[in-house]
Image (cartoon, helix red, strand yellow):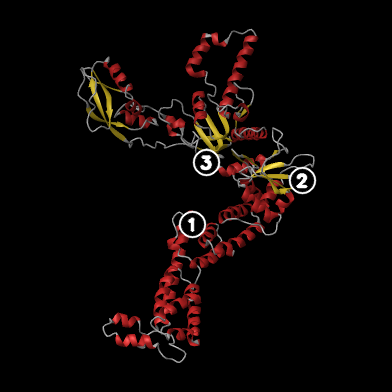
Amino acid sequence: MDMVSEEDLPWTRIEGDRIRDDEDVFPTMHAWSVSFTDPKSIKVFQEYTRTRPLLWEALQHLKLVKKVELDSSGTIYHVIVGLDLARPPEDVPVGMYSEPMQCIVPSTPALTRGQLASKNKLWPTVFSPHLARLPVSIERAEVQRMVNGMRMAINEAVKAKQHGEVPIAACLLPDQYLNVTLLAHDTRTSTHHPLKHSVINIVRALSDQVLLADVAKINNGEDNPMRNPAMVVSLQNGEGYQLTNRTLYLTHEPCLMCTMALVHSRVKEIIYIHPMPKTGGCGGHAIVPELPTINHRFTIWRWKEDSIHSIFGNIRLDFCGVWRAEFARTFDQAYVGFVPKKMSSSYALARKAAQMLPISTFVHMTEEDDFGRPLPNISPLFNSPTADLVLSSSDSCHFRVHRAILSEASPIFYAALSTLSVHKPTDPPPVQDLTEDGETILILLQYVYPIPNPQVSSLTSLRLALIAAQRYEITSAIEGLRAGLVSPKFLETDPLGVYAIACELGLQEDAKIASRATLAFDILSTPLETPCLENLSAKDFLKLVRLHQSRAEAAISVLESMAPMPHDCCGNICPSSHADERSDNSSSSSTRNHNSSNDGLPYVRWFVTWKAAAVRELKARPRSDIIFDHAYLLAHVKRATRHCHECAPTFMANATQDWLKLLKNRIDALPDVI
């Protein structure tokens, strides 16, 4: 018999914390118990335990009474009255009972017969072999049957989407009691009923099927099954639960409500494809069947991600639609070993396209809404009467475009749109829902068609458009938007924002260009509320800070190493400054060193004030254009001429200007990119 082991199945088991006890080593806990000899007292402590929910829940894996047979003096009964308490409970019933005493009890149920014998020596323990979850093996023919069941659920979800419903579906295969295949999908949209989930609908369909069978028996002259005493007893014993010993195939993980419906229906196991992390009750938000207070447990299987594409082709189900690819492979081609074959480049491209574009969200639209009014928000720039496709943005803006142009511009659109049938001019064009907003789509289409000089109003809009261009692999838009990103329009006003976008999108060359532009700004004084910092990683920002700091230190070092400057064109020093230096006998050595060159000659006065200001400026903005600006230099010269009439001629001397140019060139030659 050809069997498939659990690890080779195309689905995997969903489970919570598994109990892994050995037969001799297992976890224990402390408890308080009382002893008595009258068996009638057991009822007293049963009521005591049930009126304490926390204690009752904690004792689910243990039996309430421990019975100890004595040789000659009779039987002693022990009952647990408290758990893990520093002192015994104070509200224990008063009677012919012993004082509470501590004991050690198992903290988990017994999974095997060996564990049961070992744990019963401490305290009678519940035997729960189903919690062991031993690996299973399934016949390959049964696996094929289960795969076909899931395939039918997927097809039902596709039909649901075509009828405007949420594409979620369920399937029940025939068995010895059910001679038809039952399919149900979500009908919340059409019925305006919030509880019409696919699980609820299929349980109702199964109940209707059973009811029809009973009615048929009555019509054939048989007695009403509900009046048969044997049937009443069987219903009381649980045979009325509709999903007992049945496997349910679901496209999506059931929500908490549907999971409880499955608990009450006593389903044997479920298999689903798409997890629901926020609302799911079978592995997403919670695992309801494994909660300690649930009175029925069932097995949960989730389809493996790689098996979805290898068995069903490239398909993914979501609330936004059903994704399909052009090159979907059949089950027979990919069934061997459940291992996907190596995909060709065209199939890989189609798989990527299918993950991005919800193809089944194509619906036919008319030029008017249900009230006969023209559709709103149609872009006047893209409203061609010969369009064979309508792009709809997330904010309900519509763009009438041509498939051929989109296909030429984007391989993603090419792979996705090639699955559509040929558009007839007499039919309204289908609508493709996109996740981008209207402004982003408008920018992309201006590069796709193209339209001369596309305008991008802000860095935020450019970022969103560039992300979308990379997503759809529109080369023309990527190149155009990158050029706009490093244009003077944005580099001169917000170089830090440009740098953040370039780093976020992996544009290394653009990041270097932007890092050079940030040298004109004091980045450490940037407010924390600046939007660009939200998408800038700490690592990239640290690179920028180190660039500013290292360049500032190097530039200041250049200023120090280039001193002294030529005093004037004749080699004379500034007389006023020299006179101040000679007459200031009380000045400190630090002052003389500050106003003196390395050869003992004093600096000119304007150079001293300019250099101090230049050092402060370089620490904030390590660029040369500000400190060597002619107006900036003249301001310090004018300030110095109040005390020295020779400073102005000294500054205007050709030798001084040549020296300043040399100094600026050396600072400009320093590294200026990350």
Relative to 229, 389 lies left or right: right
Tell me how far mark 3 sits from mark 2, CA to CA: 56 Å
- Above or below residue 495? Residue 51 is above
Which sits in the foreground, 673 or 39? 673
The residue that mark 2 highlights is 385
Q: Nearer the viewer, mark 2 or mark 1?
A: 2
Count residues near mark 2 (Cα–Cα under 10 Å), then give few for <14, some for 14-19, many for 20+.
few
Within-10-Å neighbours for mark 1: few <14, some 14–19, many 20+: some
User: Mark 3 or mark 2, which is nearer to you?
Assistant: 2
Q: Circles 1 and 3: CB distance less than 8 Å?
A: no
Helix, strand or loop at label 2? It is: loop
Instruction: Single out the residue that lies furthest toward the bottom.
Output: 570
Secondary element type, mark 1: loop
| Kind of residue at disc 2 | Pro
Asked if 589 appears above or below 476 in the picture, the reply is below
The tag earlier along the polypeptide, 2 or 1, is 2
Name the disc covering residue 7, or none. 3
**Which of the 4 image quarters holds residue 35?**
top left
Residue 656 vs residue 349, the one in the foreground: 656
Above or below for 180 versus 543: above
Residue at mark 1: 536
- Front position in the image: 212 or 380: 380
